Amino acid sequence: MAKKADGPVVQEYFTKEQQRLRMAARDVIKKEVLPYIDEWEEAGEFPREMYTLFGDLGFLGVGYDESIGGSGGDVFDQIVLTEELMRSGSGGFAAGLGSLNIAIPPIVRRGTDEQRERFVRPVLEGKRIAALGVTEPGGGSDVANLQTTAVRDGDHYVVNGSKTFITSGVRADQLTCAVRTGGPGAHGISFLVIEKETPGYAVGRSLKKTGWWASDTAEIFFDNCRVPAENLIGEENQGFYAIMENFQSERLSLSVMANMTAQMALEESMRYTKERQAFGKPLQGFQVTRHKLVDMATLVEVSREFTYRVAAKINAGIEQIKEISMAKNFACSVADRVTYDAVQLFGGYGYMRGYLVERLYRDNRILTIGGGTTEIMKEIISKLM
């Protein structure tokens, strides 16, 4: 969508409908989330009713086809929702409520119609919580060597092993789980949907994290867990490709989260340095402060623009494996720098609980790890250069 602006053509990323979605989501966050987010952070989870609320409003279904219970929309509709969820000031809330977006895409892309009705529609309606189970205690980034096994036994798979760092894992009703059904390496991996009530499925302790407090994070164990073979997503031993498909959208989401983390840190810094007095004048009265804010703002603007450009190409169906890896690394490095500088501008207050920049600083740290570490991103980029 383009419009004239004093002569040159200006490319817009968001339609009027998407801007209306933004305002609607922002209003819900303001009324239903912001008054309680500090309490939820301390509790280590937010009320399950939030899934129902956001499902009823159609927000969980953004970006998914109406035929499977979604609300329609494209990549930029999902970006709008992610940005507004981040306006809660809690990356954990955004990650927990959004865990469906890494859990159900393999089912949407590769599942049967019956599987979509069972495992997708109730999640989009907010009636069930979905999580993704890939990471294991013995290996994080080395996905191709995961050890959880699923052995075929008649019309079931017998699953043994464990997963860790599972977002929404404590309360998840279903787990889109990567398992080894074949030999070693990438070509022996499959996806099974394992329901929480399955005998042999056990949730360990809720993990205590540096940041993202409001998202429950779990260890999950499988002890001779018998899963119906009809819960296999796609073809056996083809799950690694589904994982790789998932990563592109997950890395885009993490890039958006990083940019919003930096944006909010910048906004808080702008506000604080106008109000805070030092040596008889506001902090913004000092050139060193103004220049720091300029550097922060420039980085945020450049990172956001690059992320949007990559998103536009993804939206157009153009493969962006290298570029989204670059966008994630750059956005995370910007968020590292901007949250660090924000805390520095706040001084001692920036280190105090109760100040948003303190939470942003903590929450930011996971972004260079989740969805593929900075180092893994560099390996991917180097192979595609």
Image (spheres, helix red, strand yellow):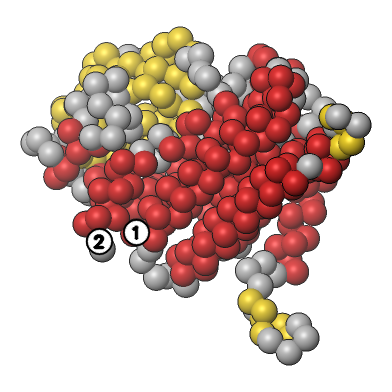
Q: Front-most of 47 and 115?
A: 47
Name the residue beneath numbered marker 2. 384
Q: Residue at x 62, y 56 (%)?
A: 298
Q: Nearer the viewer, mark 1 or mark 2?
A: 2
Secondary structure beneath label 1 = helix
Q: Amino acid at mark 1?
A: Ile
Looking at this rendering, what residue extends furthest in the bottom direction? 7
- Between marks 1 and 2, how big is the CA–CA gap? 8 Å
Q: Is residue 21 visible?
A: yes
161 versus 69 height, above or below: above
Name the residue beneath numbered marker 1. 321
Q: Quadrant of the N terminus?
A: bottom right
Residue 301: percent from the left, percent from the top?
62, 58
Examine the image and state in which quarter residue 137 appears. Answer: top left
Examine the image and state in which quarter residue 125 appears. Answer: top right
Residues at badges 1 and 2 in contact (C-beta under 8 Å)?
A: yes
Left or right: 43 in relation to 381: right
Examine the image and state in which quarter residue 165 appears. Answer: top left
Q: Residue at x 79, y 54 (%)?
A: 23
